[in-house]
Image (spheres, rainbow, N blue to C red):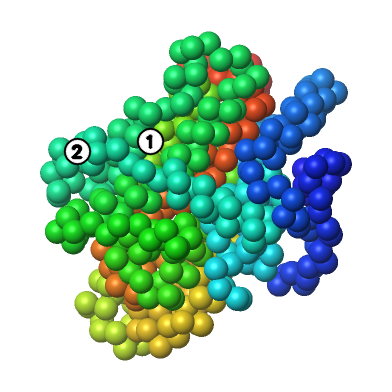
Amino acid sequence: MVFMRSFSVLSKIRSRLAHQSTGLGSVRWLQIQSASDLDLREQLKELIPEQQDRLKKLKSEHGKVELGKISLDMVIGGMRGMTGLLWETSLLDPEEGIRFRGLSIPECQKVLPAAVPGGEPLPEGLLWLLLTGKVPNKDQVHSLSKELQSRASVPDYVYKSIDALPVTSHPMTQFASGVMALQVQSEFQKAYEKGIPKARYWEPTYEDSLNLIARVPVVAAYVYRRVYKGGQIIRADESLDYGGNFSHMLGFDDPRMLELMRLYVTIHSDHEGGNVSAHTAHLVGSALSDPYLSFAAALNGLAGPLHGLANQEVLLWIKSVVEECGQNITTEQLKEYIWKTLNSGKVVPGYGHGVLRKTDPRYVCQREFALKYLPDDPLFQIVSKLYEVVPPILTQLGKVKNPWPNVDAHSGVLLNYFGLSEARYFTVLFGVSRSIGICSQLIWDRAFGLPIERPKSVTMDWVESFCKRDA
């Protein structure tokens, strides 16, 4: 919130304070922008110098402050819990979940502009919020939506690079290949080769980032139509917003599905910097690789079974429950199937999280969507029963720190209800969403001039020697 309040001194951005009551029972004061400036790039141009000075002051005055202690368990355990990255766009709290620039998901649902009255927030609004720290108004979101549409043209060679792969290739492989092909047009690479000053690195990064965000839905939709719909491509509908148009290009025009896609893209966009895909983008980007290279690397991390691929595993597992026990499964049957899964050495997909210690707010908002639009869906009924049955069983095991559902536990069932039932494709949707958070942070990485990432590694011999000396 300090970040958001600091922007209020800018003379060219008029704002008013709106008193918002949150669904969490708290009260939050938000700065909601007027329509005085529709140009996102110009706003960043004003915001960046102030934040650069702020970071410089932090470093000079508090550079030696220790943020925590590092244990051997952290080193061996994948740096889990180690404070080691600057990530401005979002912060993950173990108890309350993700906050985008200080705003929780329920708060974002209340204050970000929507396509329909009382509807889900538009992803363009979240992009504006992540980049500026301010809640945009409808005119600003509409302007950004039109700008993204103007940047969404994809060259033919991108499609050809995808077509060179077997149609049986995993959709994530095809998607990442398309993103790599987009890199040919990188503005950052061109500017760097010409010798652009370091202070202006953020400018071509901004151009690449908005181009990338605009084009990934087109590439992703092409992959879907190629793999599952015989290559019958659906052109963009310029009357639609970012999330709605993505749904349309995939082939789903039910207004409820358009709303689901807006919600899906928004809540999957960012989850602070420590997760595999976000950290990968930050790491690769720290070498001054352009946003295309950085995001393609992030997609390869997202494709892993322990990260983004988990969302396809949930739906497949739930369908296996139905195959064995039927749709009208009883609570006792479900308990037996869960124990069968656990006793076979597998996990219950969609439960647990590396940071969260309560039910994921992203799960909660998807559950609310389901209660509103598909309360009688048989698969949703199973998801609801799992919510009652799984946590006590995992708690009984005594080894699980977080027995509660995460974001993946619900998304597949919602998509399946509206006809997007191809589970292998779900991670591509996740990738499209994650472009918004990753690219927003990459712009600020360049603006801050953050250095190349280079942590120290050690061998087990070193660790053993150190521990003996420390004993």
Whether residue 21 is visible to the viewer of this picture, yes or no, is: yes
Element at label 2: helix
Locate residue 141, reporting x and y percent. Answer: 60, 56
Q: Amino acid at mark 1?
A: Ala
Q: Which label number is shown at residue 160?
A: 2
Q: Of 332 and 133, which appears nearest the observer?
A: 133
Locate residue 92, reporting x and y percent. Answer: 63, 50
Name the residue that disc number 1 marks.
296
Locate residue 40, reporting x and y percent. Answer: 63, 43
Q: Amino acid at mark 2?
A: Lys
Judge whether 253 appears above or below 100 on screen.
below
Judge whether 228 appears above or below 301 on screen.
below
Q: Of 440 and 470, which appears nearest the observer?
A: 440
Going from the N terminus, do you reach mark 2 or mark 1 first?
Answer: 2
Q: Of 111 and 239, which appears nearest the observer?
A: 239
Task: Tell me the quarter of the picture where residue 419 sits.
Answer: bottom left
Locate residue 136, reporting x and y percent. Answer: 68, 55
